[in-house]
Amino acid sequence: MTLSLAISPCPNDTFVFHALVHGLVPGAPPVDVTYADVDVTNMAAAKGTYDLVKVSYAALPWLLDKYALLPCGGALGRGCGPLVLVRDPEATPDLAGRTVAVPGDRTTAYLLMRLWSAGAEPANVKVVPFHEIMPGVAAGKYDAGLVIHEARFTYHRHGLHALVDLGDWWERDTGLPIPLGAILARRGVVDPAEAATWVRESVHAAWADPEATQEYVLAHAQELEPAVASQHIALYVNDFTANLGEDGYAAVEALLGRAAEAGLTPALANSLR
C-alpha cells in the first residue's frame, strides 16, 4: 500500500521526511508526497484527503475526528514563534483598526495573533500566500503582516520591523513552548503507532546524516540560500520533533484550551493522545 503524505516545502519538513519519502525507513510503506503551504493542508485534512499530513496545531479541533495526532515529526519549540511585521518602527504596539495579511485562518500563527490582540483587533484580515506577505507590507498594501518560518531571518531585507514576537509573548505568558505544526495519521487507514515509528526513524536518520538531506531540502527551498535553510532546520527541528513529551502536550492543550475559552475554536471532542 502506498501512503499519501502532504507536507510543506519548508526545510524543516523536507529534512524530517527525507528518509521516509526516499524509502530509507525499514518497514515503512512507499509514500506519494504532495508539497503545499499549511493553509492548503489544513483545508485538505478537513476533507480527509491525505493519509499522513502536516497541519497547524490550531486546526486540530476540526480534524481529530478523522485523524490521530502523532507524537513526533511536527514543529514545536522555543524562540521560534510567528512575528507581526510593520513598516514603521514607531508604529503603535497593537493592531486596532489595521489591515493585516495572514498565512491562513486556521494557522497557529493566526490563532496566537487573535489571542494576543484581544481587545485591539485589526479592522481587516486578508489571507495571503505566505511568499506575498512581506512584499505586500513593504509596498504598503497591508498595514501589518503575520509571518512564520524563515521570515524570522529575512524580514529585515524588506525594510520591515517586528511589532511583536508572538512566540516570545506566548512563552512569557505560559512558560511553555510554542506548538506550531503537527503530523496527523488518518484514522482507519494508518496505524498511529506504526506511523510514529516511521516518522521518528526518519527524524533520527536526518540527524545522523544531515548532508544526505541537503540536495532534497534545497531543491524545495529554492528561494533560500543554504545558510538560511540550515538556520531554519536548526530552529524548528529539535527534541520536540522526536517526541512531544509532557511539555509538548501541555503546550498544545494550553493553546487549544485558551482558544476554546475565548470562543475562537471549538472545544476538543477527541483526545490528543
Image (spheres, rainbow, N blue to C red):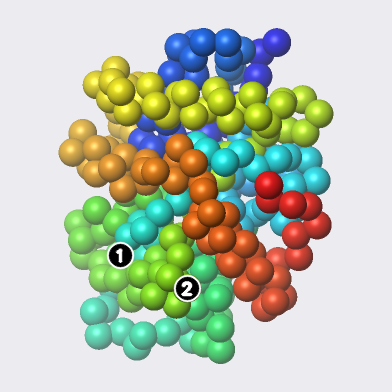
Circle nearer the viewer, 2 or 1: 2
Q: Decide: marks 2, 1 in contact (CB < 8 A)?
A: no
Q: Is residue 257 above or below residue 178?
A: below
Examine the rendering and report whether any part of residue 126 can be seen: no
User: Residue 243 — which label?
Assistant: none
Q: Is residue 104 left or right of residue 169?
A: right
How busy is the neighbourhood of tag 2: few (under 14 within 10 Å), some, or many (20 plus)?
few
- How far apart are the two marked residues, 2 and 1, measured between alpha carbons? 32 Å
Closer to the camera in the image, 255 or 132: 255
Q: Residue at x 55, y 70 (%)?
A: 125
Q: Is residue 107 above or below residue 207?
A: below
Closer to the camera in the image, 73 or 82: 73
Residue under label 1: 138
Mark 1 lies on a secondary structure that is helix
Q: Residue at x 59, y 67 (%)?
A: 254
The part of the image, by quadrant, that contains residue 193 is: top right
Residue under label 2: 174
Quadrant the N terminus occupies: top right
Q: Amino acid at mark 1?
A: Ala
Examine the rendering and report whether any part of residue 163 can be seen: yes
> Which numbered disc flags the more N-terminal residue, 2 or 1?
1
Q: Is residue 54 above or below residue 191?
A: below
Closer to the camera in the image, 197 or 127: 197
The part of the image, by quadrant, that contains residue 161 is: bottom left
